[in-house]
Image (cartoon, rainbow, N blue to C red):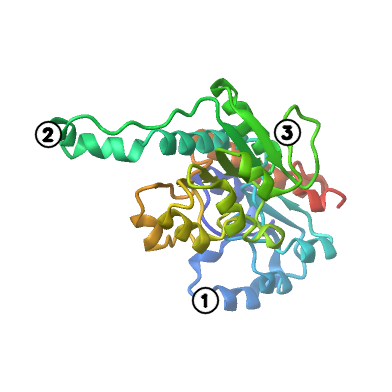
Amino acid sequence: MKDLLVIGDVTDEMRGRFEKRFNVHNLHDNDDPENWIASHGYKISYIATNGHDGVKPAFLDAMPNLKLISCYGVGYDAIDIQQAVARGIPVTHTPNVLNAEVATTALLLTLACYRNLRADEAHVRSGNWESKGNAPLSRSADNQTVGILGLGRIGQAIARKFEPFNAKIVYHARNKKLVNYTYYDNLVEMAKVSDVLICVTPGGAETFNLVNEQVINALGPKGTLINVSRGSVVDEKALIFALKEGRLGWAGLDVFAAEPKVPAALRSLTNVVLLPHVGSATKETRAAMGNLTVDNLLQHLKDGTVISPVPECAHL
């Protein structure tokens, strides 16, 4: 059997399927992963990883016989795609199966910000409703202009989720899409007209701190920023200052620059809703993601093809 390196956590179902077809090595079981890779990397033909852990470039260098990297997740910015493509190593991910769930999370964060969910729930739990009376009024989420940064599969699923709220959808992406939404080629200009800005663009060097102070200021004190993409997409320091100073009204965040570390300044703010990167974290969606991760490996083992390559590897 071929040797499979597992990086990060996997479900019991995935592990069971792996063990039927591969010699499985769990990197996180080793006290010194770097030394283990240096000594045993030549054995590895396949890798199963995730969007957070990825594969370190030095690990790839130590695996001359690597044939495929299967990523559990839609994001793959923690994998050196250029090196993989140069060596002819396909990289796969798990698109589509999580689109609806991540879109639901974006909507959830938006509604939590608009309707003061955190404050209202605390108002009840603290006994203040009984002792001090009704909670302050919140904002309606209907009839808002929703700006979407990145109108790929998930971005379009988000747009559909907002349709019952009579939202006006505008978007910024690398290219104009064949959709009935208004396209902006300038992110700052889109932020100026948006009530909500939802980040769902891929991470990586090209989008690092794309949502910077200028974009945040354009969104303004009545604006709401939602991030379900990658923490690196938003300038976290600029975001914190803007929220503290009232230059931005609210933020709903599922991802962070150095997760799971979340700045104390963010955790202390009352105009922020924070989630622990659970955009797709339902049992049903994670099971579908796990199945696709394994299916890509098994198909390549069978005939050298894959089901869902990342765009950069579609030609391999």
Mark 2 / mark 1, whichever is N-terminal: 1
The residue that disc 1 covers is: 32
C-beta proximity under 8 Å, tags 2 and 1: no
The residue that disc 3 covers is: 182
Q: Secondary structure at mark 1?
A: loop
C-beta proximity under 8 Å, tags 3 and 1: no
Q: Position of residue 177 (x, y in %)?
A: 79, 36
Three-letter code for the amino acid on which mark 3 is drawn: Thr
Q: Position of residue 36 (x, y in %)?
A: 59, 75
Q: 201 and 276: which one is in front?
A: 201
Q: What separation in Å lies between label 2 and label 1 (alpha carbons)?
A: 57 Å
Q: What separation in Å lies between label 3 and label 1 (alpha carbons)?
A: 51 Å
Left or right, residue 98 beside residue 81? left
The residue that disc 2 covers is: 131
Mark 2 / mark 3, whichever is N-terminal: 2
Three-letter code for the amino acid on which mark 1 is drawn: Asp
Three-letter code for the amino acid on which mark 2 is drawn: Ser
Q: What separation in Å lies between label 2 and label 3 (alpha carbons)?
A: 48 Å
Q: Is residue 101 above or below residue 18?
A: above
Q: Residues within 10 Å of mark 2 (few under 14, many from 20)?
A: few
Left or right, residue 181 beside residue 14? right
Determine which of the numbered discs, if any, sits on residue 254 in the image: none
Q: Secondary structure at mark 2?
A: helix
Q: Residue at x 49, y 48 (%)?
A: 254
The answer to whether residue 50 is visible is no
Mark 3 / mark 1, whichever is N-terminal: 1
Of circles 2 and 1, the one toward us is 2
Left or right, residue 93 beside residue 131? right
Q: Residue at x 53, y 38 (%)?
A: 106
Q: Position of residue 242 (x, y in %)?
A: 48, 56
Q: Position of residue 84 (x, y in %)?
A: 78, 62
Q: Which image quarter is the N terminus in?
A: bottom right
